[in-house]
Amino acid sequence: MIVIGSDHGGYRLKEVLKAHLTSQNISFLDVGCTGEACDYPDIAAKAVQKILDGTCSEGILCCGTGIGISIAANRYPGIRAAVVSDPLAATLTKQHNNANILCMGGRMIGEEMGKACVDAWLHASFAGGRHAIRIDKLEKERTL
Ligand code: RB5
């Protein structure tokens, strides 16, 4: 199950991506918004909770730029949220960073690019090996 969410800036892209997931029979859980003005940290928190409690395995988050909502999601241990705007970055952030949240900017990329990013990320696999060592460091080395 994929958790999906957005603020108002990412709402239209989120709706496009929901339809895209539905067309591929991929289940999702929408944590909002429904188009109203809202604060991206609140949406990020709702999505992160679904991943950390095991309800969902990964997530897709959109805001105007994709940046604010990624910053918000990355404040939680265990979350690796990556902002992407092209399918190569989407593939690599799964292969190298094992990104468990894909973020995109609804005011930055078009619908087709958003769908292509989601497809690339969903179809890629974490490469492990040296990348796993680096991800472990992300979790362990949190103080200077
Ligand atoms: C909302 O206007 C906008 O600031 C937000 O969607 C996002 O782009 C922030 O990073």
Image (tube, grey):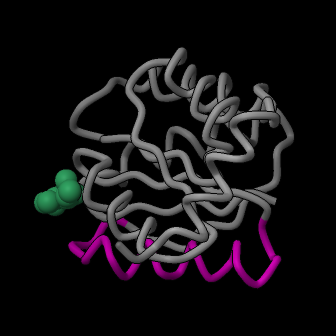
Residue at 81 percent of width and 54 percent of height = 27
Position of residue 91 measured from the top left corner of the image (x, y, whole percent): 63, 23
Q: How many marks?
A: 0
Position of residue 107 measured from the top left corner of the image (x, y, whole percent): 22, 38
Farthest residue, direction front: 144
Position of residue 28 measured from the top left corner of the image (x, y, whole percent): 73, 58
Q: Quadrant of the N terminus?
A: bottom right
Q: Is residue 121 left or right of residue 55?
A: left
Q: Is residue 135 magenta?
A: no
User: Compared with residue 139, is residue 18 higher up or lower down, i.e. above or below?
Assistant: above
Which residues are drawn in magenta?
35-56
User: Compared with residue 15, is residue 2 higher up or lower down, i.e. above or below?
Assistant: below
Query: Quarter of the image holding residue 126?
Result: top right
Instruction: Return the residue nearer the eye: 70 or 55.
Output: 70
Residue at 41 percent of width and 61 percent of height = 6
Q: Is residue 139 left or right of residue 13?
A: right
Instruction: Return the residue nearer the eye: 5 or 68.
Output: 68
Q: Is residue 110 left or right of residue 2?
A: left
Q: Quadrant of the C terminus?
A: bottom left
User: Compared with residue 49, is residue 67 higher up or lower down, i.e. above or below?
Assistant: above
Query: Quarter of the image holding residue 108?
Result: top left
The quadrant of the picture showing ligand 1 is bottom left
Q: Is residue 43 magenta?
A: yes
Residue at 54 percent of width and 45 percent of height = 102
Position of residue 112 measured from the top left corner of the image (x, y, whole percent): 47, 18
User: Compared with residue 105, is residue 116 higher up or lower down, i.e. above or below?
Assistant: above
